[in-house]
């Protein structure tokens, strides 16, 4: 364990100091603007910052709540007692709990030695992982449910991985990058998250999973991977042929699971890739348009501005400042 990191996180925060002095309950306004206790990602994340790590507030029971993001609880030291859905779970040192947006949990007050890190993750941050995950694992299903499921099924993944050195090393490195931000921290954290997911899949025998209902979405997972890998020339007709399924059946399955059509998902991928190329390369805009699969530059300009609020030229100019 990183002793220096632990000592830093053991320090009493301002919020904790107020709790100790005034014996207050959790101040909901710090977490949400809603009547129902749904912790809002806008309180912690931004368009530029898609993942943060926050030390869980000690010394007070945290009431029942949900999040509008994916949360990962990690016990750096001590333990974390909570009720997730209708189950009691005690996370031990080194263990992880993934919670999707649709499941409620409430947490018992942590003692001073209980250091819990909450990774607050915007769902979009994890989309890139589909490009290298196989469909034959529960993590893929969890991510798909979290990113696209329109039925709001509560779900968690509980990883008893305290003895897996590789996973502990990755997590500590991620925490250091998130708490001590440098120029390359955002890219580094993204790589670490990818490595973490791969390691968790490799050690899936240490996984305890909870789903409200069965979740079988292999066709949709593979459809998303198809779009990710073939966005330049992808078509619903080709996808249906690959699955040997009627066009309407594939289209209906995608729409039901993601609440988006194939065309909308493909457009989102193409525009996101175009934005990445405009920000990271010197390719002429016309070549970028062609590269992501569009042949009508006027149409591209219109939908790009609708999504990002500025034209490709404006985005590139702003990125050069």
Image (tube, grey):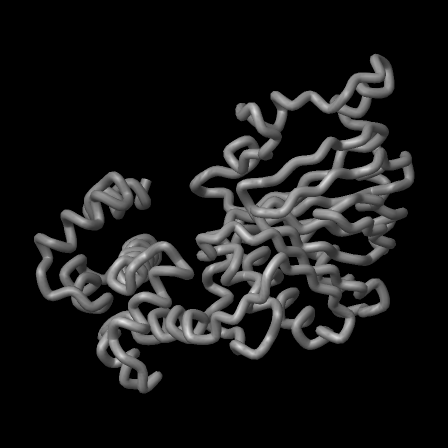
Residue sticking out furthest to the front: 213
Q: Residue 280: x, y in percent?
A: 35, 57
At 25% from the left and 81% from the top, the residue drawn is 238
Q: Position of residue 12 (x, y in %)?
A: 82, 28
Q: Compared with residue 121, is residue 162 higher up or lower down, i.e. above or below? A: below
Q: Is residue 303 above or below residue 65?
A: below
- In depth, the one of 283 and 192 nearer the eye is 192
Residue lying at 34% horizontally and 70% vertically, measured from the top left: 227
Work out whether residue 320 or residue 167 is closer to the camera in this orientation and state it: 167
Q: Residue at x 42, y 61 (%)?
A: 257
* Left or right, residue 123 beside residue 209: left
Q: Is residue 314 left or right of residue 21?
A: left
> Can the viewer see residue 182 in this picture?
no
Quadrant, the N terminus: bottom right
Q: Is the residue 169 above or below the residue 79 in the image? A: below
**What is the quadrant of the C terminus in the image?**
top left
Q: Nearer the viewer, residue 126 or 150?
A: 150
Left or right of 249: which side holds 220?
Answer: right
Tell me if residue 65 can be seen.
yes
Residue 275 place in picture, x, y as percent? 30, 54
Residue 194 falls in which quadrant of the image?
Answer: bottom right
Query: What residue sits 55% from the left and 68% below the top?
Result: 140
Count the marks.
Answer: 0
Looking at the image, the residue that sits furthest to the top is 22
Task: Give the image quarter of residue 290.
Answer: bottom left
- Residue 296 x/y as whole percent: 9, 61
- The foreground one among 148 and 293 is 148
Left or right of residue 90: residue 274: left
């Amino acid at each position: 364990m990183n002793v220096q990191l632990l000592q830093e996180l053991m320090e009493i925060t301002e919020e904790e100091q107020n709790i100790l002095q005034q014996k207050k309950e959790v101040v909901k306004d710090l977490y949400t603007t809603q009547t129902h206790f749904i912790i809002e990602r806008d309180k912690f994340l931004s368009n530029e910052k898609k993942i943060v790590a926050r030390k869980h507030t000690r010394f007070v029971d945290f009431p029942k709540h949900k999040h509008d993001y994916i949360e990962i609880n990690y016990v750096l030291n001590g333990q974390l007692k909570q009720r997730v859905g209708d189950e009691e779970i005690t996370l031990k040192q080194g263990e992880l709990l993934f919670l999707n947006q649709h499941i409620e949990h409430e947490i018992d007050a942590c003692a001073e030695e209980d250091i819990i890190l909450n990774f607050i993750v915007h769902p979009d941050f994890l989309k890139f992982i589909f490009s290298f995950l196989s469909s034959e694992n529960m993590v893929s299903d969890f991510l798909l449910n979290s990113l696209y499921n329109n039925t709001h099924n509560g779900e968690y993944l509980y990883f008893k991985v305290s003895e897996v050195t590789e996973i502990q090393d990755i997590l500590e490195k991620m925490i250091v990058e998130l708490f001590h931000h440098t120029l390359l921290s955002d890219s580094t954290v993204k790589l670490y998250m990818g490595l973490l997911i791969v390691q968790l899949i490799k050690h899936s025998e240490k996984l305890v999973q909870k789903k409200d209902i069965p979740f079988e979405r292999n066709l949709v997972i593979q459809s998303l991977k198809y779009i990710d890998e073939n966005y330049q020339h992808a078509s619903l007709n080709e996808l249906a042929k690959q699955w040997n399924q009627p066009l309407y059946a594939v289209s209906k399955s995608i729409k039901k699971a993601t609440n988006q059509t194939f065309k909308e998902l493909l457009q989102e991928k193409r525009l996101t890739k175009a934005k990445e190329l405009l920000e990271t390369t010197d390719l002429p805009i016309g070549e970028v348009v062609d590269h992501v699969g569009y042949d009508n530059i006027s149409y591209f300009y219109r939908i790009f501005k609708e999504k990002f609020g500025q034209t490709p030229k404006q985005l590139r100019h702003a990125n050069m400042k």
